[in-house]
Amino acid sequence: MESQVLSIRGMTCAACAQRIERTVRKLAGVGQANVNLASEKLFVEFDAESLPLSTIKAAVQKIGYEAAEKTDDAKVTIPIGGMTCAACAQRVEKAVKKLEGVTGASVNLATEKATVTYEPRTIRVSAIRAAIEKAGYKALEISKTDAADEDRARKQKEIRTLWTKFAVSALFSLPLLYIAMAPMITFVRLPFPSGLDPMNYPLIYALTELLLVIPVAGVGYRFYTVGFKALIQRSPNMDSLIAIGTGAAILYSVWNTWQIMNGQFGAVESLYFESAGVIITLILFGKSLEAVSKGRTSEAIKKLMGLAPKTAIIIQDGDEKEVPIDEVEIGDVVAVKPGAKIPVDGTVLEGHTAIDESMLTGESMPVDKKAGDPVYTASLNTTGAIRFRAEKIGADTVLAQIIKLVEDAQGTKAPIAQLADVVSGYFVPIVCAIATAAGIAWFAGTRDLEFALTVFISVLVIACPCALGLATPTAIMVGTGKGAENGILIKGGEALETAHKINTIIFDKTGTITEGKPAVTDVLTVGDGIPGKLLQITASAEKGSEHPLGQAIVAEAQDYGMELLKADGFNSMTGRGIEAQIGGQTVLAGNRKLMDERSIDLTALEAESDQLAEEGKTPMYVAVDGKLAGIVAVADVMKASSKTAIESLHNMGIEVAMITGDNKKTAAAIARQAGIDRVVAEVLPQDKSNEVKKLQGEGRKVAMVGDGINDAPALAQADVGIAIGSGTDVAMESADIVLMRSDLTDVSTAIHLSKRTIRNIKQNLFWAFGYNVVGIPIAAGVLYLFGGPLLNPIFAAAAMSLSSVSVLTNALRLKRFKAVTGRDTGIEFVSEG
């Protein structure tokens, strides 16, 4: 199955989205089809061998919508020097079109520019320029437009068009409303042209209203073209409701204008031009607000897209040269000055700096970088100048992968949306039936056609399928976008929904709760020995060792800036320790077995040694010239954020378990320090997923947090798999949520975000259903039946316009979400007297 994203244009409500989904799902070879009304995208999985993408696009276009393939294609405009005639332009065009990866090329002789659409993964701009040069012309400085810029420009244009339509509509509908209402207001005398008095000049009055409503109906023409087309195809949508309601008002008023022409002057009291005009104006106003709000729901992903710099400085023949980002090749040496952004992913070759990676990870503190360290696109170089080798470019960078993950997540549906989807599919036909039934019933009971028409129009206009369609996707878009801002990548709506039900979280120990590499935790000396001196001697002896514990001791000494002493006669004794000569003294460093072999008395630190072992630490005994000098304890230390994260989860009522292959004693020690409720130790990697199953068998909703390849099966088995960003690609692929940092407080942040998002969706759905359940009966005249007021169609239109805006506004409240934070560090030096 192949996945593809199509941009859809022409949708106005949830009924449109449902119709597209139904149409595409009917096609043989389609596995899944989801339409996101808020982002106006169709996410489809299909068998490309039996069903070409063009067939899917044709099916969507056949029912009245535009379907454009969402590609990673880029567009570049290259000014060309040396062209003298049309034959030159043709020659350049042919030369460029021949290139593999070029999807379109057009050369304009008048402007002397070539506009080229190409696939950045297949071909670089430098190759296009080279082809132009090879054809005998000069490729000048270029300007580039990517798909994100084009999409942003298109949406901005749509918003401007809607506001313009609203302004034109308001310009004519306000005087129309005044002319219609002023003569009816008797408690205050409003200024009114005597030549338009409906009692004396009814025909002029009616024709004036008709002339004012025509421009309003003109700017709202899409309601009629789309609405009636959908009606004819037996798939009515919100446009159909507006078209029928306002169309009926205008036609009834035109009929009464004809009656006035024929001398029936009493018909002047049965004109509804102003209702139609004001309804269209109010709905255009609502649509304009909706378009602005929808744009804000996807701000996070637009912000991510805008992070990458447009140019890079590469080193060519020893000189610095600024080139467009698309001309950077893998293997290029890139120079970055202080204050500039990293243009592509790579590894530092020279220089030292601190880089702000907050835009990718949410981590506010700059990260120190030196030769050999990785750097990522869009992160900010704060202090020093560096040079690095480009290793990932274009769609392969971490930033591009994050954007793809967020886009994919926004294309999925949460199970909670299923009810709204089902209702949306039947909503418009049911509303049409209710409006018709209510109109007929009131006409049968009152014999008053105008009253019945008022009810009919009010029911059609107040109904709002938009609110139902926007309730879930807008909240998911804002929620996943907010997660990305905080370094939490949620892969789909289902993961977002399931996360709020989690009541048990299993953490892998090594690399998740702990750092995953040994570090010095304690330095204990005998008598009045100096801990720093003991660490220096031990590190000097261990300098030649390849054992992880020895390397941890050397790293600790170097972190403190200690000078390592010259060691001679280094001897490594497998499974026991090492021996070396330092300054004429024999230094032994190793376990109890080595000390017993050399008859070293350990009594002085026996109790401390047992205590360290109880805490899950490995005591390394150090003897100098046959006498115990002290202990250097090493352990896979707990991450600074682990205890805070677990406390936060406990505060949310979530049980925390830890799973590890380590022995029970070490696991229990870490569990005590971290405050973990349940420990599963001595588990083989392949059995981790079975432990997850056992907890699920107890009726628990389980999340698994891990980082390694051996965690992948358990991540896949869990209700929600959470991979931490420092982990392997396999773990991240298996997970539902990816944490860009190794900070475990992000686990509680992810669950808190899930709870907030689902609560927001429930509020939206409650409002969307509640509004329609209450509003439609009122519009149908239920209150009037019991002596209450009858709803005017104008107020019905106002309520309808604001209902979808209120849903969007509520979803945007998620933008105020704040992440959980917490830090704590420390190391202990003790001298035993």
Image (cartoon, grey):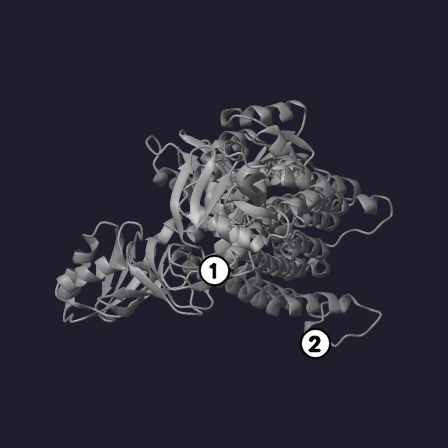
Name the residue nearer the viewer: 411 or 466.
411
- Going 54% across and 62% down the picture, which residue do you hit? 162
Give the amino acid type for the residue marked by disc 2 in the picture: Pro
Q: In this view, does 243 lie above or below 89?
A: above
Q: Where is residue 755 in the image (x, y as percent from the top left)?
A: 67, 43
Q: Given contact means CB atoms under 8 Å apart, are the residues at marks 1 and 2 in contact? A: no
Residue identified by numbered label 2? 193
Q: Where is residue 632 in the image (x, y as percent from the top left)?
A: 56, 45
- Going 72% across and 41% down the picture, which residue do you hit? 650
Identify the secondary structure beneath mark 1: strand
Q: In this view, does 275 lie to the left or right of 712?
A: right
**Residue 368: numbered disc:** 1
Q: Position of residue 192 (x, y in %)?
A: 72, 75
Q: In which quarter of the image is residue 137?
A: bottom left
* Residue 619 is at least partly visible in this image: yes
Q: In which quarter of the image is residue 608?
A: top right
Q: Is residue 710 left or right of residue 395?
A: right
Whole-angstrom CA distance, mark 1 to mark 2, is 77 Å
| Image label count | 2
Q: Where is residue 802 in the image (x, y as percent from the top left)?
A: 67, 56
Give the amino acid type for the residue marked by disc 1 in the picture: Asp
Q: In this view, does 462 lie to the left or right of 371?
A: right
Q: Residues within 10 Å of mark 1 (few under 14, many from 20)?
A: few
Give the number of the mark in front: 1 or 2.
1
N-terminal of the pair, mark 1 or mark 2, is 2
Name the residue nearer the viewer: 321 or 438.
321
* Residue 237 is at least partly visible in this image: no
State which quarter of the image contains the N terminus.
top left
